[in-house]
Amino acid sequence: YPLILSIENHCSIPQQRVMAQNFCDIFGDYLLTSPLDLMETSLPSPEDLVYKIIIKYKKLAAAPNDKGTDDVLSETCMDGILYLEDEYDKIWRPHFFVLSNNRLDWTAEQTDSEDKEDDEDQSEEEQSEDEESPNEELHFSEPWFHRGIDGVAATKLLQHYNKGNGSFLVRESSRAGGYSISFWRNGVAQHCRIKTKQVEGETTFSLGENDSFVNLYSLVDFYKLHPLRTPQFEITLTEAISQPNAHLDKEWFHVSLTRDVAENMLMRAPHDGSFLVRKKETTEKNQEAFAISFKYV
């Protein structure tokens, strides 16, 4: 397979030209500087590019009759990521901008793959910090985790959903930094405080005397497979009780969006399978109705 060198994240536009010349001098014929076939009508396959080296840089969108990209880059005064407000969903999205003496150019919206490529340039220390944070916060995105409810509210939720023995939720307790688990057993809501303890600077979580978990996610996962034993009973966690209206704060949900606007938004989405869920107008029976729209070409 070819080797692709990405230099746009590491040096300025003028310096990129210097680096490119150095690469030509060092790599020689291994560096691909022109098409393999001048008459080609499609991109070459990876097999055609074996042992070849390719330099990648951010290419700017050029309108008809505009000066070439290289001319724009050579006159650059400043470049970087700026945000534009989307006219349909009013969300600020990143674009790559280049400012020259007499014009301002920008690319289409930065895609997830480009953002991911930028992230690969993080130092090992930054990456380790990013990896640690999700481990401590795994429960935040779980349907069974509820913020800001007490035991009374938890009992009402368990009664309302009526999912049977072992149905459960985890909630923040009245004690700062503490958590409790509430579950349904024989028609009654049971509440158990989750114990926390500091071990060598790390917080551990436990329900029993002999268990210990590094996060709430691991604790819940364990007791979905193994029974929780107390002097009075033992029970295995079964179905999670989800947060009411948890969809309201999801990025894919739109409270007020017409079908036409939804279609326009999806037309500009980069990938098949892109989707959104929107709330429709109340039906004749005064029931809430929703529609899911997705892109498929």
Image (spheres, rainbow, N blue to C red):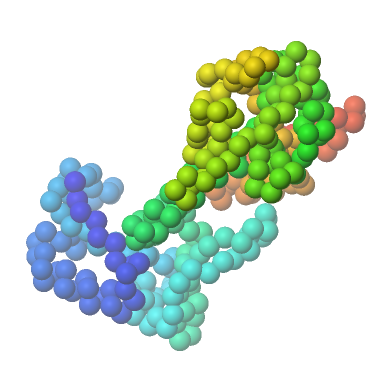
**Residue 227: percent from left, percent from top:** 57, 17
Residue farthest toward the bottom in the current orientation of the protein: 101
Tell me the quarter of the picture where residue 16 sits: bottom left
Judge whether 275 appears above or below 239 on screen.
below
Total number of numbered discs in the rendering: 0
Q: Residue at x 24, y 56 (%)?
A: 4
Judge whether 216 appears above or below 72 on screen.
above
**Residue 40: percent from left, percent from top:** 23, 50
Tell me the quarter of the picture where residue 237 sits: top right
Q: In screen coordinates, is 4 left or right of 217? A: left
Does any portion of residue 277 appear in the rendered image?
A: no
Residue 167 or residue 46, whichever sits in front: 167
**Residue 164: percent from left, percent from top:** 72, 15
Does any portion of residue 70 appear in the rendered image?
A: yes
Tell me the quarter of the picture where residue 174 sits: top right
Residue 219 or residue 246, whichever sits in front: 219
Q: Residue at x 48, y 58 (%)?
A: 110
Judge whether 209 appears above or below 12 on screen.
above
Q: Residue at x 23, y 44 (%)?
A: 45
Q: In screen coordinates, is 290 left or right of 203? A: right
Residue 195 or residue 63, whichever sits in front: 195
Q: Residue at x 40, y 59 (%)?
A: 126
Judge whether 85 appears above or below 36 on screen.
below
